[in-house]
Image (cartoon, rainbow, N blue to C red):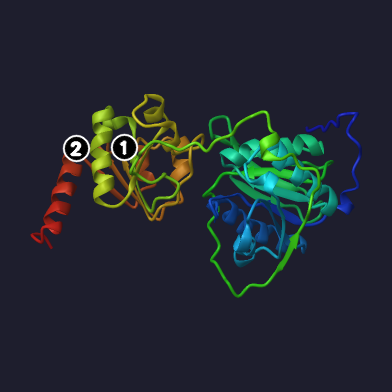
Amino acid sequence: MSTSRICPEWPQVDKNEYRGIWVYVEHQNGVIKDGSLQLIGKARELASKVNVGVTAVMVGHKLGDLVKEPIYYGADRVVYVDDEALAVYMPHVYASVIVNLVNKYKPEVVLFAATKRGRELAPYVANTLRTGITADCTDLDIDVKTRDLDQVRPTYGGNILAHIRTPTRRPQLASVRPNVFPTPPRDTSRKGEVIREVINNLPKPNGSLISIKPVTKGDSDLPPVEKADIVVAAGRGVGGPEGVKLLVELAKAIGGTVGGTKKVTDAGWLPVDRQIGQTGKTVRPTLYIGVGVSGAIQHIFGMKESKIIVAINSDPNAPIFEYADYGIVGDYRQVIQALLELLNQRRAGKGS
């Protein structure tokens, strides 16, 4: 049995006034985040079921031709605000802009990529609009009769998928983990409408009481796990930091990067931003190599969409082998050393 409750101070909404699916398009340094492009593709699929359009909303300063990019990836329309006050990201200011646009256009669904910024911004918007939000979704669908968004996310450690709806409020908000949907192909022949909106009285950056400066990450020469085409993942079976170092050597040799399971990052062998799994990053590389990874469902959740999965484990009964395209049973040190020697031989022109 299910029940629904509405806060008494929340005004009732006429759901019929709200139409269309919006995607907040996040960008940085003139580049749109992959998670936003992936959401445009999914929004296109949802919109076709209820016969509405897809709108990309962009906020920033000196956006230039970047506002055309969402159309190339499947959006029908781009609504954007370009203002000096938006040159520096401040969540309450960006949220107020999005709320203004939502109140004017009344979309029935607004989607955010569950990046660090998206996870921060979406709740601001939901709270101001007095509507619900489901965070970190891994799938979305829409009921064509009720037009309720079916928001799917793991719960209870990834063992159960919860289906969440917002039947009494509009718009419906959800944030979606990057890489759970593929990035649609870029088609520069697509045409769409681009609308610039102006919102007055935005606070100027120099009027803020808080000084915000860009934060740069460490000098890691390995790409982020969610960006790499080849991922070498460390499990608890690598034994410790020295084992991870060997995996880093392999990753560099094959042009990839290194990630790990939750137990590896919890132990401090890798930084948290390299965790792959239900509570970490979702990856979709061409090649995934799991080393000492047992195959717990929480980790599998974050890498199961990899095109080719290779598992290296000393335990022939490890669950990871059930998901692997290729499995190697043996001491991972011997296996990786043999791989490194083979790679070195080929570089030297001694191998075939």
Dot 2 lies on which element?
Answer: helix
Q: Is residue 125 visible?
A: yes
State which quarter of the image contains the C terminus: bottom left
Relative to 280, is 50 above or below?
A: below
User: How many marks do you count on the picture?
Assistant: 2
Instruction: Kindly give the residue lying farthest to the left in the view shown.
Output: 350
> Which residue matches tag 2?
333
Residue at position x 48%, y 44% in the image: 282
- Image spot of residue 68 (x, y percent): 63, 64
Task: Work out whether residue 134 can be spotted.
Answer: no
Depth check: 20 or 161 in front?
20
Instruction: Please report the residue visible at 36 percent of the width from the left and 38 percent of the height from the top.
Output: 219
Task: Specify whether 16 is left or right of 148.
Answer: right
| Left or right of residue 90, residue 267 in this image | left
Amino acid type, callout 2: Arg
Q: What x and y, as percent, mark residue 260?
A: 38, 36
Q: Which mark is nearer the camera, 1 or 2? A: 2
Quadrant housing the N terminus: top right
Name the residue tied to disc 1. 317
Q: Secondary structure at mark 1?
A: loop
In the picture shown, does residue 301 fall above or below 264? below
Q: Earlier in the sequence, mark 1 or mark 2?
A: 1
Q: Position of residue 340 (x, y in %)?
A: 17, 47
- x 58%, y 45%: residue: 138
Q: Quadrant of residue 291?
A: top left
Q: Nearer the viewer, residue 321 or 289?
A: 289
Q: Is residue 201 left or right of residue 217?
A: right
66 or 51: nearer the eye? Answer: 66
Identify the amino acid type marked 1.
Answer: Asn
Q: Give the crowd class for mark 2: few <14, some 14-19, many >=20 residues within 10 Å.
A: some
Single out the residue that lies furthest toward the bottom: 189
